Image: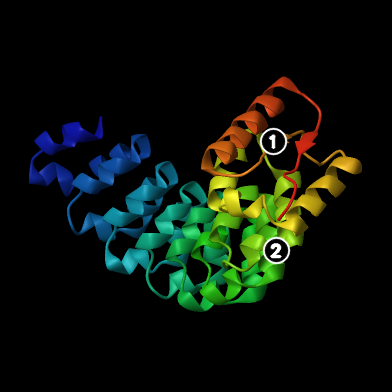
Amino acid sequence: DAYSLTYFNKAFRADREVMMMAVKECGTALKYASDKLRGDRALVFEAVHQNGSTLQQASEEVKADKEVVLEAVQRYGAALQWASEELRADQEIVMEAVKKDGISLEYASEKLRRNKEFALWAVQQDGFALMWLSEELQADKDVVLAAVKQYSLALRWAHEELQSDKDILMLALRTLGKADVDDLCLCIEAEMLLREKFFQKSLKSAIACPGEDVPILTVSVSSGVDEVGEAVFHCEASLMSGATFDCHIPHGG
């Protein structure tokens, strides 16, 4: 238990051999090492190998060591937040972090988060990464399509105009997972969306020619918040029961 090291005297915490044994067993033991040992590259490497989050306990010098940081983010993507500014702009480091967890993109340099080529790669790994891209890229249809294809609810972080884009909406429906139905309807303001003629037409088209990647939904919507809430309920029930498409589109408008 790393916490037991709190009872060790300073001499033990400054003993490299003792602390090396400790971090090999439990990476978080680095927290109790002396300041000097938290700047020991080899010792910190062993610690982050066990637990990437322990990078936060390392000295600033070690946080700028590419090999150590690379090991940390491969274990825990969000360890990127404790890397030096230079390494948070290093594409190799950030790519490894995003592979582990798309949320890690939050800690990448602004330059990388504004790079379209890199953004396309990132959202293909994890659509959640769209949340941390620049506003310009959140309004880029290519990037949003790639994000929604990987994770349907990435739609919530797209620019407002793209949240009502037909191609993107239909892709979101096709990639929708069972647990996503309610959130999707909320994030695209379902009451307004489901009344839109283009959406009704698109939905009818999807139902008429369902492919294997089209989710099985039951949509029943007229008007008003209560009815939209009811539609969400039916969508969830349909996906769980394996029912077929049964679409009731409101008339008029």
Pinpoint residue 35: horizontal percent, then vertical percent: 18, 58
Describe residue 7's horizontal placement relative to residue 235 as left or right: left
Q: Residues within 10 Å of mark 2 (few under 14, many from 20)?
A: few
Instruction: Name the residue: 58% across, 63% down.
Output: 158
Pinpoint residue 22: horizontal percent, then vertical percent: 29, 38
The residue lying toward the viewer, choosing from 161 and 201, is: 201
Residue 154 visible to an observer of this rendering: no
Residue 241 visible to an observer of this rendering: yes
2 and 1 marks in contact (CB < 8 Å): no
Provide the residue designation for mark 1: 220
Describe residue 147's horizontal placement relative to residue 87 as left or right: right
> Amino acid under label 2?
Asp
Q: Which of label 2 and label 1 is nearer to you? A: 1
The residue lying toward the viewer, choosing from 168 and 195, is: 195
Image height of 73 relative to 229, above or below: below
Pinpoint residue 92: horizontal percent, then vertical percent: 57, 67
Residue 165: which numbered mark, if any?
Answer: 2
Q: Residues within 10 Å of mark 1 (few under 14, many from 20)?
A: many
Instruction: Name the residue: 33% across, 36% down.
Output: 26
In terms of secondary structure, where does tag 1 sit?
Answer: strand
Instruction: Name the residue: 75% across, 43% down.
Output: 249
| Nearest to N terminus: mark 2 or mark 1 | 2
- The N terminus lies in quadrant: top left
> Amino acid under label 1?
Ser
Quadrant in the rendering for residue 241: top right
Describe residue 145's horizontal placement relative to residue 115 as left or right: right
Describe residue 208's horizontal placement relative to residue 22 as left or right: right
Quadrant in the rendering for residue 64: bottom left
Instruction: Name the residue: 65% across, 29% down.
Output: 234
Which residue reaches farthest top? 241
Image height of 202 relative to 135, above or below: above
